[in-house]
Amino acid sequence: MLRSIMRADAVRNLAAVLRTGARLLAEDPGTSMSAIASAAGVDRTTVHRHFATREALLSAVFQAKLDSSEKVLDEARLMAAPVAVALHRYVEGIIPVSREWPVDTRIKMQQDPAASTRRQEQSARLDAFIQRALDEGHLRRDTSPAWARAMLDQLVDSAAHRFPEIDAAQAADLVVDTFLNGLGTH
Amino acid sequence: MLRSIMRADAVRNLAAVLRTGARLLAEDPGTSMSAIASAAGVDRTTVHRHFATREALLSAVFQAKLDSSEKVLDEARLMAAPVAVALHRYVEGIIPVSREWPVDTRIKMQQDPAASTRRQEQSARLDAFIQRALDEGHLRRDTSPAWARAMLDQLVDSAAHRFPEIDAAQAADLVVDTFLNGLGTH
DNA sequence: CATATCTGCAACACGACTGTAGCAGTAATT
DNA sequence: AATTACTGCTACAGTCGTGTTGCAGATATG
């Protein structure tokens, strides 16, 4: 999609379709192109002009999410910054991304090998960070890396979608605190 | 569905369709009746004989899950047993249920008001238990009940589906420990 | 303003899924 | 063994979503 030689209104429409699509597909993965089109305020055929097939639209939505989250991963400096700092920065950055692109990247990605490998790369970066936190003694030594990773993902998801009214900074505090300390009295 | 006057093979088929349906619908909520039928080893029309419409099948799957989880809630004695005991018993009981009926009960329940209210009732029982744990000092006083509830749900989900190889008892240990203590070093 | 680009609208073909019906054959129940 | 209940198979109609085309009108761009 060569945005540089596109007319301005076309770029607007394309962005609207992408965002609306992400929102509706998150609510119901079976949402039709017609539904997305009308919700985005354009005709169904216009959507088809930008995205030849339904799969192409899904790919574009995933790509958009992957772009955003990759930027967050870069800026968090997971392997360079102190663990506590990197963790908080990542969470604070990824929550708005998760809210803007609420689609679940786990669904139906086997169709899109390019996006699939890209997702795995990003996942590996997070896994490496968890391992680092474990090695440096920030996590209990009996913690399974996979379990810690799952917890982090789930906490981010909860904060992003079940508590949409909390701003990212506060939500990050909550997530990190719960991740490290749990909810029980000590 | 009057199981008492049904023939034995019919009961078997019905159960197979229900379980297979739950499994496939969890992977992809858009799974067709044909796909469920063939995966269950019966003809498509046979499925229609048991469940007139697609919605009816979904309802039945949800009902089955609600039946199982209600039993767990009862046996956990959430308001009578000591908090720590009730929590562990609930988690240990609900994980197999979540594995057997992996469908997400949040999806498309507005169509089924009966199941919807039943789900809300069960949800309220868990909320009350969280509140009790808070009142009795088992949770940090600054904990939001809604956040604690979300955490519990997510932990159970993770243990049930992302770690299917761990047996329910061990998984319950892990969930409760993470819920109360988090993963950080203290 | 003149041009190229984009859009909405209407129409069409195609395939997939749903839901129904009849009937012959099979399996369970007494 | 006789009866009833159940199933597979085939066929059909209806609906919905997808993807494509043509054209006239609107909008951005220079």
Image (spheres, coloured by chain):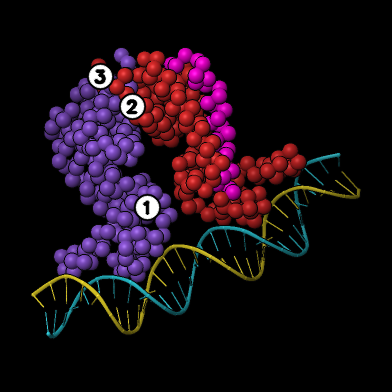
Chain colours: A purple, B red, C cyan, D yellow
B96 or B85, nearer to the observer: B85
Disc 3 from disc 1: Cα separation? 39 Å
User: Percent from the top left, x then y, of residue B26?
Assistant: 47, 44
Measured as percent of width and height from the top left, residue B78 is found at 49, 21
Q: Secondary structure at mark 1?
A: helix
For marks 3 and 2, the one nearer the N-term is: 2
The magenta stretch is: B56-84
Q: Amino acid at mark 1?
A: Leu
Of all chains, the one bearing label 3 is: B
Q: Which residue is mark 3?
A: B185
Chain under disc 1:
A
Tag 2 subunit: B
**Which residue position holds label 1?**
A25
Q: Name the residue tied to disc 2.
A: B144
- The mark closer to the camera, 3 or 2, is 2
Query: In percent of the image, x 74 and y 42: which residue is there?
Result: B6
The reply to whether callout 3 and callout 1 are in contact (CB within 8 Å) is no
Asked which quadrant contains residue D12, the reply is: bottom right
Measured along the vertical axis of the image, is residue B18 above or below residue A171? Answer: below
Disc 2 residue type (three-letter): Ser
